[in-house]
Amino acid sequence: MERTEPSAHAQVPRITSSGGGNPLLREGTLDYGLTDLDQIRDEHWLPALEAGIDAQRAAVEEIAGDPAPAEVSTVLHPLGRSHELLSRVERAFSCMFSVHATPARQEVQREITARTAAHRDWLAMHEGLYGRLHALQSAVARGETSATGEQRRMLHHVLDEARAAGAGLGEAAQEQLRALNLELGAAETAYEQLQRREAEAAAVFFSDPAELDGLDAAESVAAQAAARDAGHAHGALLSLTLPVQQSPLERMTRRSARRRLHEASVSRGTLTDDEGRTTSQIGAHIAVLRARRSRLLGFEHHLDSVLPARTAPDRASIERMLTTIVTGALARLDTEIQALRDSGVVEASDPDEPAGLRPWDISFGIAALAKRERTAAGATGVGPGPDAEQRRDVPLEQALHQVFDAASQLYGITVVEREDLPDFAPEARSFEVFESSAEQRPGSGIGLFLLDLYARPSKSGGAWMNSFSVASTLTGSAPVVINALNITAPAVGERTALGPSAMRTLFHEFGHALHGLLAESEFEELSGTAVPRDNVEFPSQVNEIFQELSAGLAGPGQQPTAQELWGKGFSTVEHAAAVVLDLAWHTLSVEEAETAASDPEAFSASALGAWGLDHPLVPPRYGIGFFKHIFAGSSYAAGYYSYLWAQVLAADASEWYREQLARRQGQQRSEAVAAAGSHVRRELLARGNTRDPLESYRITFGRDPSMDALLRQLGLAEA
């Protein structure tokens, strides 16, 4: 992979604080304003946070007391610059805590959560600032002062956030809201930390490594190394990932071993914290607090309180989408389950176990039957042979080349590794992103891309994108984004190779990274991925389809084959079930939430049953005891439907790409890829939330999104 010396990225002067020995209090000394992460110590976080809070409060008081007429230059611009130090601290801590949550950082997190919650309340309920924002809104409406489209959207965004946070409430109600927010922040932190502890404690130990028959050599070696690291003299240890379906279940041939792994996964939510609470109980209490908060703000339930900041217009539109998908997925799942029963692949894998399918058999059976079908197809010469799945494992460097090359073809960028920058996590890697048309010279770069691939006990589960800084012409900041995955590190002497699922995740998360890297925005609050929650997954899901482009296959959006559709009923049902749980917990009145919290598991089961998703063989992707998306923070609360909502957009967009590339070959096809990518970059990715994302969709693709493409891609159209 190409490497280069550091670039001297031109910096726009920014507000700085004298920081003494605290690197967070100074403008970052590395390229793109990145702080030298090697210099940060745990004792730096809280003083820097307090300095950031003080700086913003002083700026807000100045805005509120300014006698000058309310204009963009006297209200919006100083407000947009007021959080520069605070954002730098919060973003850096969020990035570094998520990948390496040491015990010391967990203590810091509790303090940061409480202090930032109190500060956000102060900011949102500041009467003088609220008045100045209203005065600016009135002046713009009367034509007394000018504002661009993005500035109007920013004003609307800030006022909406203030109202949603309690601006305009009476003093007594605001005091109640502050208390609720503090309690809610503490509960979300407690959930996250206990869920992390339980994931580590629930790792499954196998005294005989032969119990892991079916896993490849690298997986077995890694599991044995994990056992030794955990203090076992022998055996193998499998850690749990966040979703209920653990990846090794697809390959483990011993049903008794699969059962142990599956049962450990679904039983999460029983470990207690120092106060005797389980994550299930904490999660249910969080739902109660959110219901109380919504009522105080004048909403029926939590979903209603967050819908004004989403693209979905109402609950009914979400449920119509969900009904269509659930109906088709359940019908397809029935067909898949019957095929598994008829095939006998599960019983043949371990005749010593009782006959009949069990929940721990489904992902194994789907994979085994798919392999059998590939074998049959290979024997007839009409499809790939039985080793096709093995050949799909991609060495890491080749995988990164494919991801970066696809982005280069589409968006005209070049990604170059930087070995001189400090790692933000153990074994992390750094890259600089340039315009392909520009020489790699000082000042010509777009931003930095930092990558942390490997799982570790101190790391959050799953995969995600985050930012040390985002693009903003107002503050002069450039994008520095991270991607974090949880790939098992290879054994000593082995090289990392990514299977199909990991490759998809790598493309997905880099789609988020591109959304941040290619942003063009005046305000940080509207930049890149700062779009409504039910829109943020759309660009990342679109990027998944370019695995095909990078591999030189038929092209993005190609209709899936029957073999590729195998198992879609199963995966869609478990996904939809998690969506139902999220909506169920966040569409409750206060009284209903309090009743549900008395028996969280019973309520969850009842909610699934109401949708016909209480399937005995297919549990939801996440249970209430390990549903980090919705309980360890508020971003996805009443918003887990966003993945399906975004899939509708992504599937329709992939059809558009397919239309652009149809009937083109060779150089014409390359030109079509570049033209399509340039258009999407300019009208959608760069725009972020500077205009309505659905308007950007219509401008980009020339139509409203339709569900038809997704139903075809999931094999649900006929059902």
Image: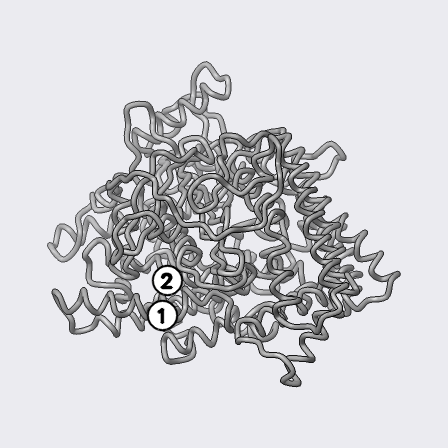
Which residue is painted at 69% across and 34% down in the image? 272
What element does badge 2 sit on?
helix
In the image, residue 55 lies at what x, y percent?
68, 49
- Amino acid carrying mark 2 in the image: Val
Q: Quadrant of the N terminus?
A: top left
Q: Position of residue 128 (x, y in %)?
A: 78, 65
List the single residue furthest toward the bottom.
142
Q: Give the mark nearer the N terminus: 2 vs 1.
A: 2
Pinpoint residue 13: horizontal percent, then vertical percent: 51, 51
Q: Mark 2 — residue? A: 542
Name the residue furthest top: 233
Horizontal side of 12 relative to 493 (left or right) equals right
* Residue 54 vertical position relative to residue 302 in the rendered view, above or below: above
**Placement of the C terminus among the 4 image quadrants:** bottom left
What's under tag 1, amino acid-wise? Answer: Ala
**Callout 2: 10 Å neighbours few (<14), some, many (20+)?**
many
In this rendering, would 69 be left or right of 268?
right
Q: Which residue is mark 1?
A: 653
For the residues marked 2 and 1, what is the alpha-carbon distance in whole angstroms? 7 Å
